[in-house]
Amino acid sequence: MNNDEWARKIFSETELEELSVTSEKIVYDSEHGIVVNIGLSNDMCVDLIEAWGKSHHGEMAAQLHMLHFIEGLINYLKDYLNNEGIPFDDYE
């Protein structure tokens, strides 16, 4: 019995094609992506950590600081996906 003969006994040709496409996407996604390097000074690291903690205690300025940081990261990721031609839903 060859490698896919057992599968043909269980699945239809359409199901096998769908499984093949899905598995190829999973492999592609696991092998491709983006490495995000963030260059922060020590002071910036301290500021972010402090803003993170303060934001959880309702401090509006800290929440805005974190929002702007995350927004910059998200915009970077959107640019990457657009350049790669990878579709995504943008709910702005």
Image (tube, grey):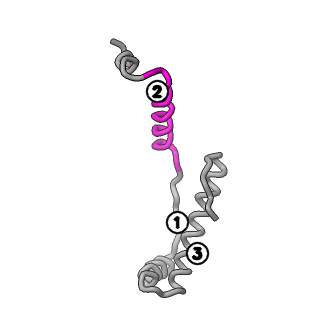
Classed neighbour count for the residue bearing mark 1: other residues with Cα under 10 Å, few (<14), some (14–19), many (≥20): few
Residue 82, position in %: x, y?
Answer: 66, 51
Q: Position of residue 12 (x, y in %)?
A: 45, 21
Nearest to viewer (mark 3 / mark 1): 3
Q: Which quarter of the rendering shows the C terminus?
A: bottom right
On screen, residue 85 versus residue 51, left or right, reads: right
86 vs 52, left or right, is right
Is 50 contained in the magenta span?
no
Name which residue type carries label 2: Glu
Secondary structure, mark 2, is helix
- The mark nearer the N terminus, 2 or 3, is 2
Q: CB under 8 Å between callouts 2 and 3? A: no
* Residue designated by label 1: 38
Q: Secondary structure at mark 1?
A: loop
Badge count? 3
Under mark 3, the amino acid is His
Q: What's the residue at 41%, 23% (across, down)?
A: 11
Q: For the residues carrying marks 1 and 2, which lies nearer the camera in this image?
A: 2
C-alpha gap between disc 3 and disc 1: 15 Å
Q: Disc 3, disc 1: CB below 8 Å?
A: no
- Report crowding for label 3: few under 14, some 14 to 19, many 20 or more residues within 10 A (C-alpha): few
Q: Is residue 9 above or below residue 77?
A: above
Report the front residue among 38 and 4.
4
- Residue range of the region highlighted in magenta in the rendering: 12-33
Q: Residue type at mark 1: give it.
A: Ile
Q: Which mark is residue 68?
A: 3
Cα gap from disc 2 to disc 3, whole angstroms: 45 Å
